Each structure stands twice: as structure tokens, then as C-alpha cells.
Image (tube, rainbow, N blue to C red):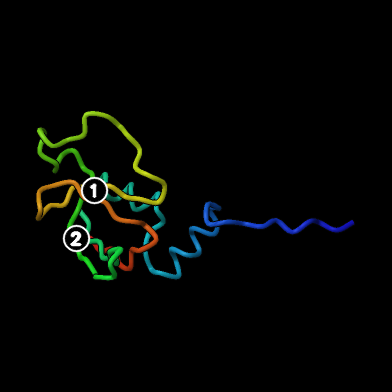
């Protein structure tokens, strides 16, 4: 009796971990957790190909009270919505375009 091959897509947690390890970045879940706990410097490629380095957070202790989200709306799948510390505004980026993550 043979065991059928199980095809795994990018949604598979194991695949996500391997890809994150290869890129040297946290998984999407870990990235969101770290952003909720403090500030990170995230480097990613914008859709137009330009590289962007952004100091950002999801921590309510850092985001000004008047700018905190009023609802817990989920961003589109694969997107990360953050508070840009320097621009003082909400920004988002695609997780699969992240190239580097550092503590600030």
C-alpha cells in the first residue's frame, strides 16, 4: 500500500517556516507577534520594485491613542498593516516582499 503524495501550498505552516528560515526573517505569525510587542525595522520591496526600510509597530503602547484602530479588521491575506513610526501613519506591505527584519 502506498501513501499518496500530499501537495503543500504556501498556506502550509511548515512551508512558511522553511521559506522564512531561508530568507532569514520571522514567519508572518511571528512577525505580527513581534510588531504587537514593540518596534521593528522592516525592509521590503515595494510593488514598483523600490526598496523601503520602515520603522514600524502594532503596539498600542506606541501608537497614539487617536490613531489606534477602532475595529479589529483583518488585512487582506498576506498583507501586514503597521504604524509607521517616522511617517506617523498607517502603512501596509506584502509579507512575501519582506527581505529583512531587525529590532529597532
Could you tell me residue 98's position as x and y percent? 33, 63
Image point 49% across, 58% down: which residue? 16
Could you tell me residue 22's position as x and y percent? 45, 70
Q: Is residue 80 above or below residue 15?
A: above
Residue occupied by mark 2: 54
Query: Dot 1, how many residues are within 10 Å of its Cα: few (below 14), some (14-19), or many (20+)?
Result: many
From the viewer's side, name the closer residue of 6 and 46. 46
Q: Which mark is residue 33?
A: none
Image point 10% across, 39% down: which residue? 64
Mark count = 2
**Horizontal arrangement in the rendering, residue 61 relative to residue 23 (left or right):** left
Could you tell me residue 9's position as x and y percent? 58, 56
**Horizontal arrangement in the rendering, residue 96 relative to residue 82 (left or right):** right
Where disc 2 sits, the SS reads: strand
Alpha carbon separation for disc pair 1 and 2: 10 Å
Where disc 1 sits, the SS reads: strand
Q: Is residue 22 above or below residue 81?
A: below
Image point 10% across, 33% down: which residue? 66
Image point 33% across, 47% down: which residue? 33
Query: Dot 2, how many residues are within 10 Å of its Cα: few (below 14), some (14-19), or many (20+)?
Result: some
Could you tell me residue 6's position as x and y percent? 70, 56
The image quarter in which residue 21 lies: bottom left
Earlier along the polypeptide chain: callout 1 or callout 2?
Answer: 2
Give the residue at the far front of this rendering: 48
Residue occupied by mark 1: 82
Circles 1 and 2, Cβ within 8 Å, touching? The answer is yes
Amino acid at each position: 500500500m502506498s501513501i499518496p503524495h500530499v501537495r503543500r501550498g504556501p498556506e502550509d505552516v511548515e512551508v512558511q517556516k522553511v521559506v522564512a528560515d531561508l530568507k532569514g526573517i520571522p514567519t508572518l505569525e511571528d512577525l505580527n507577534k513581534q510588531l504587537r510587542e514593540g518596534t521593528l525595522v522592516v525592509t521590503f520591496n515595494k510593488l514598483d520594485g523600490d526598496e523601503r526600510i520602515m520603522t514600524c509597530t502594532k503596539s498600542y503602547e506606541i501608537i497614539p491613542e487617536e490613531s489606534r484602530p477602532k475595529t479589529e479588521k483583518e488585512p487582506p491575506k498576506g498583507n501586514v498593516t503597521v504604524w509607521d513610526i517616522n511617517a506617523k501613519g498607517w502603512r501596509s506591505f506584502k509579507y512575501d516582499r519582506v527581505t529583512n527584519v531587525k529590532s529597532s
